[in-house]
């Protein structure tokens, strides 16, 4: 071009109504109430107000924007007022559903706990949480009935032993789930624990990532059984051996369930252990900058990955703004037929043993956890791990003490050799405490396990039954053999009663895929046991050799 001058170009202004709220494209103005709240004040800042104001002035003094927004950044959710039936969940205002008590989520990175830490959680549960404690399917422990007045004292106790609730909920990087046998399994490819420590130290509780479009879930495993449900996380690092560079991780992004479930996709890159935090930072940065903030329902990383495709995603990740260099291509990991839950007795690489046990749908209590801590210590161990299947594992047990430990835990209600039903049934929080719930879950699932153990005691295959209290997917219904989505259904007399929409045939690992929602398969809560017995008996009668339930 010669002889032509032009005025400097103004940066393109986002056209009103066209953007999806991506910061990197200039859409910095909040497009909904959640974004507005986050812009008004960083969620992490609410801690000072809890300590200095709300804990003294009580529940009624809490600013609603803090109560239903920023409190989450410190693991606090208001719990559901008791006695409100599921039919009213969608029709009541949030404040009508709020109880004056909180659920408090204690973040347990990689599920790694010492006996002392377990004892402190137990003490907090007994003192401040009416003895409640649930092991979640993201390796956290959740307490209920917490009063805002007690929160500073609880933090003091937890933090004195290295536990915390920072960013346990909210639009932030949530707990990093990891193989519960990291560092001890004989067949482990690589131990991701140093990478978790790096990320936690550098980024958790930092304002760099305290305002993401929505939650961001991370999973890491170096175990060949892929024991952290890597397909359904925003980012996963999955152990693999590179033919030239040795053990490291295959990077997956964009998985997630809830509405519009998607499986994570391989980036096709091999990441060495000491660079995991860099790859993680790059992906979270892309999510923060390009994630869709207009609609909460589109605000997960999976939508961006699906829209961009993997070539573009990798190109942006490698760009100067993020990693600033090319990633190393890597091999795909071998996919296990069944993902590991580590229940049972297994030898560690140092010759000692670990013992995995199954609580009923993750429900425990403070007083029981205190007894577990005593039993663990009495058997010479100091390490416990929670799992992504609502189980826990005791590590470092000498062979001579294994059977005594197994019996002592069984006396507390935790079986190392559980029935297939107990082992493979999970349930979310449900109507007991969750404001989004439509139906009961935990107690119903516990009863279901008892009934099925009686009716089909010798089930010889793992059939996973995941029970959710609403259309969200906290208990991963779409990837269960039998996924149960809580809703109101019609009973035989045409009355609306609590029940479930059934999803059949989902799975993870080799048969990863989402269960089919079968129109006719809606079942009342009362009819659930009969229904599951019927589909299981049909499968047992008609299966061919080696045919899995999901096939
Ligand atoms: Fe609550 Fe629904 Fe999640 Fe269950 S699935 S914990 S009912 S939001």
Image (cartoon, grey):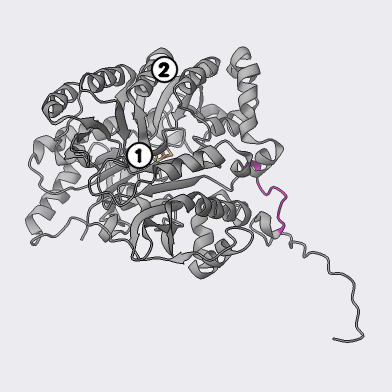
- CB at mark 2 closer than 8 A to ligand 1? no
Q: Position of residue 472 (x, y in %)?
A: 42, 45
- What is the tally of numbered marks visible in this picture? 2
Q: Can the viewer see residue 321?
A: yes
The answer to whether residue 215 is above or below residue 328 is above
Magenta stretch prevailing secondary structure: loop
- Taking the image as four quarters, which one is ligand 1 found in? top left
Residue at point 9%, 53% (across, down): 540
Q: Position of residue 360 (x, y in %)?
A: 24, 31
Residue at point 57%, 35% (across, down): 205
Q: Position of residue 202 (x, y in %)?
A: 55, 40
Front residue (pair 37, 268): 268
Task: Give the spatial CA distance, label 1 vs label 2.
Answer: 21 Å
Q: Secondary structure at mark 2?
A: helix
Within 10 angstroms of label 1, few (less than 14), some, or many (20 or more) residues? many
Q: Is residue 30 magenta?
A: yes
Q: Position of residue 438 (x, y in %)?
A: 40, 37
Q: Secondary structure at mark 1?
A: loop
Magenta range is 26-34
Q: Quadrant of residue 424?
A: top left
Q: Is residue 426 magenta?
A: no
Front residue (pair 389, 430): 389
Name which of mark 1 and mark 2 comes first in the sequence.
2
Left or right of 419: which side holds 115?
right
Front residue (pair 29, 484): 29
The answer to whether residue 499 is above or below residue 339 is above
Quarter of the N terminus within the rendering:
bottom right
Q: Which mark is residue 137?
A: 1
The residue at which mark 2 appears reads as 124
Left or right of 317: which side holds 532?
left
Q: Quadrant of residue 551?
A: bottom left
């Amino acid at each position: 071009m010669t002889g032509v001058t032009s005025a400097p170009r103004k940066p393109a202004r986002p056209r009103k109504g066209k953007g999806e709220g991506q910061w990197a494209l200039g859409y910095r103005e909040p497009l909904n109430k959640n974004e507005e709240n986050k812009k008004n004040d960083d969620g992490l800042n609410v801690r000072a107000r809890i300590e200095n104001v709300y804990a003294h002035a009580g529940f009624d003094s809490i600013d609603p924007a803090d109560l239903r927004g920023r409190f989450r950044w410190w693991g606090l959710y208001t719990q559901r007022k008791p006695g409100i039936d599921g039919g009213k969940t969608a029709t009541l205002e949030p404040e009508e559903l709020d109880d004056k008590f909180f659920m408090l989520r204690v973040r347990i990175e990689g599920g790694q706990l010492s006996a002392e830490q377990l004892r402190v959680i137990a003490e907090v549960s007994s003192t401040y949480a009416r003895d409640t404690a649930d092991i979640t399917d993201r390796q956290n422990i959740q307490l209920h009935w917490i009063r805002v007045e007690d929160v500073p004292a609880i933090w003091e106790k937890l933090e004195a032993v290295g536990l915390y609730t920072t960013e346990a909920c909210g639009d932030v990087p949530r707990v990093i789930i990891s193989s519960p046998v990291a560092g001890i399994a004989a067949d482990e490819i690589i131990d991701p624990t140093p990478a978790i420590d790096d990320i936690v130290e550098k980024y958790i509780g930092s304002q760099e990532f305290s305002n993401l479009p929505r939650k961001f879930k991370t999973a890491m495993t170096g175990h060949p059984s892929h024991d952290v449900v890597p397909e359904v996380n925003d980012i996963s690092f999955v152990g693999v051996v590179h033919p030239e560079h040795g053990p490291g991780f295959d990077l997956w992004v964009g998985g997630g369930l809830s509405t519009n479930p998607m499986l994570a996709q391989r980036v096709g890159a091999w990441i060495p252990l000491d660079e995991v935090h860099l790859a993680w930072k790059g992906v979270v940065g892309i999510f923060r900058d390009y994630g869709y903030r207009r609609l909460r329902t589109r605000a997960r990383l999976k939508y961006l990955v699906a829209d961009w495709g993997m070539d573009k995603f990798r190109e942006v990740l490698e760009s100067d703004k993020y990693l600033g260099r090319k990633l190393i291509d890597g091999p795909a990991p071998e996919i296990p037929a069944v993902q590991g839950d580590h229940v049972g007795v297994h030898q560690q690489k140092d010759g000692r043993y670990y013992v995995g046990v199954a609580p009923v749908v993750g429900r425990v209590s403070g007083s029981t956890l205190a007894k577990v801590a005593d039993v663990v210590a009495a058997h010479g161990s100091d390490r416990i791990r929670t799992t992504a299947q609502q189980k826990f594992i005791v590590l470092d047990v000498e062979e001579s003490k294994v059977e005594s430990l197994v019996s002592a835990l069984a006396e507390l209600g935790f079986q190392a050799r559980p029935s297939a039903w107990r082992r493979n049934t999970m349930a979310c929080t449900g109507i007991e405490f969750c404001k989004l719930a439509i139906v009961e879950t935990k107690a119903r699932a516990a009863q279901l396990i008892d009934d099925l153990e009686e009716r089909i005691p010798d089930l010889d295959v793992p059939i996973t039954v995941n029970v959710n209290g609403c259309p969200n997917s906290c208990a991963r219904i779409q990837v269960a053999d039998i996924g149960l989505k809580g809703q109101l259904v019609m009973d035989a007399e045409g009355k609306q009663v609590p029940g479930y929409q059934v999803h059949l045939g989902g799975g993870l690992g080799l048969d990863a895929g989402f269960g089919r929602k079968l129109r006719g398969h809606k079942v009342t809560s009362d009819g659930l046991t009969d229904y599951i017995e019927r589909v299981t008996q049909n499968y047992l009668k008609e299966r061919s050799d080696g045919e899995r339930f999901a096939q």
